[in-house]
Amino acid sequence: MSFSARWGLFGGSFDPVHAGHLHAARAAREALGLERVLFVPARQSPHKLDRDLAAGDARVELLELAIAGEPDFVVDSRELRRAGPSFTLDTVRELVAERPRGELALIVGSDNLRGLPDWRGVHDLLELVRPVVVHRSEHPEELLVGLEGRLKARELAALRDGFLRLPPVDCSSTELREKLARGEALGAALPPGVEARIRELGLYREVD
């Protein structure tokens, strides 16, 4: 891939942040030569309105622990300060206004591709960013099946050009929350210090 984007935007619930998130961010930084990667925790995903998240300040604290020692990684909490669901387009527009001469890469997991056409202002969004699609597939073209006709040809081409294949990292926030609720130790699945702080804060405990 050949990108001139210098900053990367990595949004999500980060509930909790795990080793897979850091793996994806590092790979994108190396592949694109990013000067900075912004981790932007959502106040509430518009696609997961029925799920309660851990408090925003707790997720920020865990993110800051996770990226300690990574000077190119920064936690940006602007979505937590905005009311209502967190829309990526709003965040991108703010960042573009703040850095009108900068370029922005949007780091997206392949599991989010199917729903991408339903994102608010997706066509405007893809005009403002260079998408980076982190995936594990040996046949990435299959990831675009079903998107034809829902996205423009140039948008599909941008997604295709932004494919970034990573070796598998067996991490899922959902599975990690379930294991934490059962009191299981997670080892390398969580960045150093994160598991201990989760337990100190009493997060993700099973409710009787």
Image (cartoon, rainbow, N blue to C red):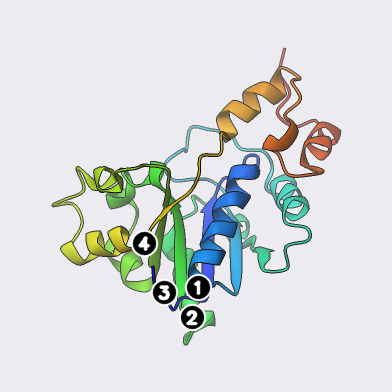
Q: Amino acid at mark 1?
A: Glu
* Distance of label 2 from label 3 (alpha carbons): 21 Å
Q: Amino acid at mark 4?
A: Gly
Q: Residue at (60%, 64%) from the top-left corner?
A: 38
| Rendered image: mark on residue 163 | none
* Distance of label 4 from label 1 (alpha carbons): 23 Å
Examine the rendered structure and indicate whether residue 28 appears above or below residue 13. below
| Quadrant housing residue 200 | top right
| Quadrant housing residue 178 | top right
* Distance of label 1 from label 3 (alpha carbons): 21 Å
Give percent across and percent down for residue 117: 27, 51
The residue wearing badge 4 is: 162
The residue wearing badge 1 is: 94
The residue wearing badge 2 is: 97
Cβ–Cβ below 8 Å for labels 2 and 1? Answer: yes
Q: Residue at (49%, 69%) from the top-left corner?
A: 32
Examine the rendered structure and indicate whether residue 34 appears above or below residue 86. below
The residue wearing badge 3 is: 3
Q: Residue at (49%, 50%) from the top-left corner?
A: 85
Q: Which element is circle 3 on?
A: loop
How crowded pointer 1 is (Cα within 10 Å; few <14, some 14-19, many 20+) is rated as few
Q: Nearer the viewer, residue 2 or 143?
A: 2
Label located before the other in sequence (2 or 4):
2
Label located before the other in sequence (3 or 4):
3
* Distance of label 2 from label 4 (alpha carbons): 24 Å
Q: Residue at (67%, 36%) from the top-left corner?
A: 189
